[in-house]
Image (cartoon, grey):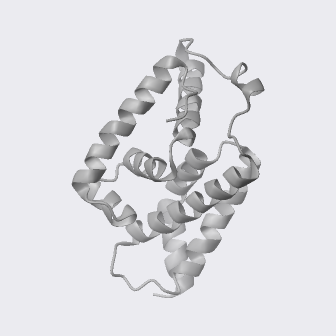
Amino acid sequence: MSQDSLYRQAADTYGPSLDRLARAYELDPDARRDLLQEIHLNLWRSFAQFDGRCSLRTWVYRIAHNVATGHVIRQRRIRSRLVSIENLDTMPGNDQGEGAASQAEALERLSMLIQRLKPLDRQIIVSYLEDMDASSIGEITGLSPANIAMKVHRIKNILRRWFGEGGFHAE
């Protein structure tokens, strides 16, 4: 299969997942578009070396997470802190509303909390939220399935605690 046809297949199959992945790594819409474009470019380039030793899904997620992790590292170098002290007061607290607006707000808060995680933890939880099993996540990260399961449990507890506390602590 050619590089272009592999890319088209991956983009068609995993496009929405890549959008969600980019959202988990970058909240700013303009920076998110740039990140998504960078993911797609690197994905297309990577298919020149794709040899089928892993599944297309594993390959796509490995490339996407590597690009997103590099993006986070670059952004952290640019901004020494993700959230300034002034912005903490304006962020949503632990208020519970009703309906779609409160659900959207809760999802936005969860996205912000996921952004606070270390890059590896973020990669693991985003993959988990994309319904990947521990074995598949392990193929992407290089960790054992048992280690992945333990980390997912720990990360979920951290996110649950942060969410309940208003969620703006570093771990």
Residue at point 34%, 37% (across, down): 154
- In the image, is 155 to the left or to the right of 46? left
Looking at the image, residue 13 lies above or below residue 41: above
In the displayed image of the protein, which residue is found farthest to the left? 146
- Position of residue 97 measured from the top left corner of the image (x, y, whole percent): 56, 11
- In the image, is 87 to the left or to the right of 39? right
Residue 115, by quadrant, is top right
- Position of residue 63 measured from the top left corner of the image (x, y, whole percent): 51, 68
Judging depth in this view, the residue of 13 and 23 nearest the camera is 23
Quarter in which the N terminus is drawn: bottom left
Looking at the image, residue 43 lies above or below residue 36: below
- In the image, is 94 to the left or to the right of 87? left
- Position of residue 62 measured from the top left corner of the image (x, y, whole percent): 45, 66
Looking at the image, residue 52 lies above or below residue 82: below
Residue at point 71%, 19% (across, down): 89
Marker count (numbered): 0
- In the image, is 64 to the left or to the right of 131? right
Residue at point 54%, 75% (across, down): 7
Residue 72, by quadrant, is bottom right
Residue at point 74%, 47% (across, down): 79
- Position of residue 140 measured from the top left corner of the image (x, y, whole percent): 38, 64
Judging depth in this view, the residue of 50 and 119 nearest the camera is 119
